[in-house]
């Protein structure tokens, strides 16, 4: 078998693929964070909790309302997005005039409340969400056996990431959103409903987290803590990509998934810290992040 | 500003904030402490359910011993050894704790055992698995109650290796418990003519196991040894199923609890071989206890939760028999009395601190074989305590060979 640096090529390709799957989740989650931060200046620490809520919405929908996976892909983000809208209207809105730290603390507290409640009602050991029938089974890629569902995750994530990027960077709506961040009062003077934009942005960002939650439900056990460990990595991804940069979060999400995948082969013990080591290096060498402008 | 904001946020998220207030006990009370994972990965294995069974035992005992009121202290160690140890020390210094029941996590339990030795307070390690608790980390005050890594390996690994599973690859949780479990299993496998083809050490609480499983598959071993626990165990078995690895490698659960099987579902878990110290559906007595617990908690108890009941009862009986809460006298009483209850028949605490009792090698039923809720296991073998826990190793200075 051909080898590079003593590792068989098949292993490298396998880890590359799996890294892309994990990177897809990082990209989708960091994208939502970057949208919320880039357009609203809010550091949304409740992102991991909304991700878990998305997975729970899918699970409960399936168990109690007969909502299947395909419907859940649409309905769960909608439902959780509505929760996000309520949070923005009732809580976050009151903190806009203050230091961003207040928003951060509020969302952090909110995350503890949401995760604590899920833990209280559903326990710690988690529940299984079945892989939808049409996506079960595996495909043989030659170098590895890949479950079809994981391939689906990559496809959906890339589609969602790039359409979000397109909407924000290339459309009139996106231009308006960016203008609202740049100078809200002026835009409002032109007759644009800026508060509505803020609520839509937060709802949209939260819905992205919930969508990632639905996507991951068949892959890992649905638990109250599923977002806790993930969100810290995702924050690091956002910092590496350049805070608030949409493209930065997509690219660094995918590539850090791959880097982490290789670490799992070369030195598995370090696989949960490699992202933070890279974050430290980026902060030293390029404090604004890889794609950030400052 | 923004950078500072993010950095502070990261620090805030990494610092979990939780600390249960502890009641101040009167000096005349008999104080039973419980330090366990109440909010993390292992919270369903013992956790709130174990607090419940501890209280059931106290109520069944009558609520008093030697005319003194029995009170409890409960706190969450958050899987951090320093928190477990400092809380125990605080209870010993300020709250007059008479006995400590320890929940999940070997790392925390080792730290708490050191405090038990320093403060001379009996310590029942219930949820922790690491056999070092009664070997190199043993103390005169430690009782290892429900199971240990040696018994798990003797049960699961012996059964599989005897049935032709000769070559093993391990997925090992990267902390004290995982390493001990892997070492115990591999020495059993090798003693029966099997071979270890490799192992990968996985950080605790990893969100994805597929990369590690791919490495396991690349080893071409016959058996996938899962030397992990809780959510890590469930997620690794789930991914192994998804990647079709369980069709080629036989999965061996070196530690699985009934709650894990319940969350995975029989479709995923069927056929799995595991070892347990207790199961609710063994005999009329276990079923009666299961029923009482079910009425309160809406699920069947794990072996740890049943163990909490039994350990609390055993301690209180020893205090009553000794006529004092004096640690030396209670320990002497504990080590000379047979334990007979819903948990074990003729169990006894050996001089190195292991509670010797029967262990059960189980196979998870298929969905067709399961006839009623929580009907998950069939008994492959009842292992007598001496066989399960093995002879005294001599590693504990208090118990030479």
Image: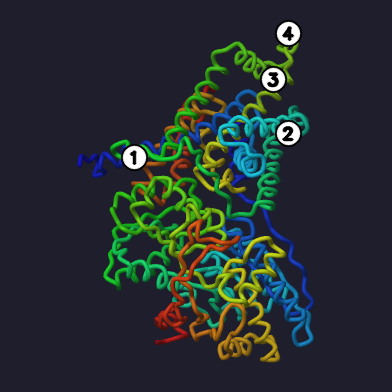
Subunit under mark 1: A
Residue B145, horizontal then vertical, whole percent: 55, 76
1 or 2: mark nearer the eye:
1
Find residue A257 and report its horizontal and vertical position in percent. 43, 37
How far apart marks 1 and 2 lie (CA) works out to: 41 Å
Gap between marks 1 and 4, in whole Å?
53 Å
Verify CB contact (< 8 Å) between mark 1 and mark 4: no
Which residue in the structure is indicated by mark 4?
A190
What's the CA distance linking mark 2 and mark 4? 27 Å
* Residue placed under numbered mark 2 in the picture: A87
**Residue that numbered label 3 is attached to:** A197
Viewer-side residue, B85 vs B193: B193
The residue under label 1 is: A14
Above or below — where is A144 with respect to B328? above
Label 4: few (<14), some or many (≥20) within 10 Å? few
Is disc 2 in contact with disc 4, using a CB cutoff of under 8 Å? Answer: no
Of labels 2 and 4, earlier in sequence is 2
Q: Going 56% across and 40% down the picture, which residue do you hit?
A: A231
What element does badge 3 sit on?
Answer: helix
Circles 4 and 3, Cβ within 8 Å, touching? The answer is no
Secondary structure under the numbered disc 4 in the rendered image: loop
- Badge 2 marks a residue whose secondary structure is helix
Q: How is the image coloured?
A: rainbow
Classed neighbour count for the residue bearing mark 3: other residues with Cα under 10 Å, few (<14), some (14–19), many (≥20)? some
Residues at circles 1 and 2 in contact by the CB criterion of under 8 Å: no
Mark carried by residue B157 = none
The C terminus of chain B, quarter of image: bottom left
Alpha carbons under labels 2 and 3: distance apart: 15 Å
Closer to us: mark 2 or mark 4? 2
């Amino acid at each position: 078998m051909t080898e590079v640096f003593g590792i068989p090529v098949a292993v490298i390709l396998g880890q590359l693929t799996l890294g892309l799957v994990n990177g897809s989740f990082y990209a989708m989650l960091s994208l939502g964070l970057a949208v919320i931060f880039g357009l609203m200046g809010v550091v949304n620490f409740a992102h991991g909790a909304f991700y878990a809520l998305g997975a729970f919405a899918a699970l409960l929908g399936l168990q109690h309302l007969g909502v299947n996976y395909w419907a859940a892909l649409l309905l769960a983000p909608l439902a959780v997005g509505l929760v996000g809208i309520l949070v923005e209207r009732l809580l976050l809105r009151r903190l806009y005039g203050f230091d961003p730290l207040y928003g951060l603390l509020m969302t952090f507290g909110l995350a503890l409340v949401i995760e604590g409640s899920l833990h209280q009602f559903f326990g710690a050991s988690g529940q299984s969400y079945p892989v939808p029938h049409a996506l079960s089974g595996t495909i043989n890629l030659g170098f590895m056996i890949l479950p079809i569902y994981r391939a689906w995750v990559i496809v959906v994530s890339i589609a969602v990431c790039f359409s979000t990027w397109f909407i924000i960077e290339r459309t009139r709506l996106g231009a308006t959103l960016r203008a609202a961040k740049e100078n809200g009062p002026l835009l409002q003077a032109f007759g644009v409903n800026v508060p509505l934009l803020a609520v839509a942005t937060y709802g949209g960002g939260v819905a992205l987290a919930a969508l990632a939650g639905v996507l991951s439900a068949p892959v890992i056990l649905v638990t109250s803590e599923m977002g806790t460990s993930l969100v810290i990595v995702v924050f690091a991804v956002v910092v590496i990509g350049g805070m608030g940069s949409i493209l930065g979060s997509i690219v660094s999400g995918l590539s850090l998934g791959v880097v982490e995948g290789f670490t799992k082969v070369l030195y598995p013990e370090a696989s949960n810290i490699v992202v933070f080591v890279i974050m430290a290096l980026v902060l030293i060498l390029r404090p604004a992040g890889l794609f950030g402008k400052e | 500003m923004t950078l500072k904001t993010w950095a502070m946020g990261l620090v805030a998220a990494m610092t979990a904030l939780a600390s249960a207030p502890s009641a101040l006990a009167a000096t005349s009370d008999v104080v039973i402490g419980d330090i366990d994972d109440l909010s993390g990965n292992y919270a369903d294995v013992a956790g709130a359910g174990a607090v419940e069974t501890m209280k059931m035992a106290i109520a069944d005992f009558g609520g008093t011993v030697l005319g003194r009121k029995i009170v409890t202290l409960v706190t969450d160690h958050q899987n951090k050894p320093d928190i477990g140890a400092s809380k125990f020390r605080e209870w010993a210094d300020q709250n007059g704790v008479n006995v400590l029941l320890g929940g999940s996590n070997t790392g925390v339990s080792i730290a708490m055992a050191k405090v038990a030795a320093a403060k001379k307070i009996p310590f029942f390690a219930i949820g922790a698995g690491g056999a070092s608790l009664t070997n190199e980390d043993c103390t005169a005050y430690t009782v290892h109650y429900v199971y240990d890594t040696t018994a798990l390996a003797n049960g699961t690994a012996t059964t599989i290796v005897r049935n032709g599973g000769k070559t093993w690859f391990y997925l090992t949780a990267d902390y004290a418990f995982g390493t001990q479990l892997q070492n115990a299993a591999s020495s059993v496998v090798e003693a029966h003519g099997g071979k270890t083809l490799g192992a990968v050490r996985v950080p605790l609480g990893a969100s994805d196991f597929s990369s590690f499983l791919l490495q396991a598959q690349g080893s071409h071993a016959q058996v996938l040894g899962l030397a992990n626990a809780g959510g890590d165990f469930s997620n690794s078995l789930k991914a192994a199923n998804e990647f079709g690895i369980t069709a080629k490698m036989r999965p061996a659960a070196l530690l699985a609890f009934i709650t894990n099987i319940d969350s995975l579902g029989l479709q995923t878990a069927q056929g799995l071989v595991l070892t347990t110290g207790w199961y609710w559906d063994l005999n009329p007595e276990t079923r009666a206890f299961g029923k009482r617990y079910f009425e309160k908690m809406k699920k069947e108890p794990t072996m740890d939760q049943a163990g909490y009941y039994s350990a609390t009862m055993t301690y209180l009986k020893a205090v009553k028999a000794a006529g004092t809460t004096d640690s030396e006298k209670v320990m002497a009483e504990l080590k000379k009395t047979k334990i007979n209850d819903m948990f074990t028949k003729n169990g006894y605490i050996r001089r190195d601190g292991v509670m010797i009792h029967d262990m059960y090698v189980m196979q998870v039923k298929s969905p067709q074989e399961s006839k009623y809720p929580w009907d998950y296991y069939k008994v492959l073998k009842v292992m007598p305590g001496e066989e399960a826990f093995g002879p005294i190793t001599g590693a504990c200075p208090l118990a030479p060979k």
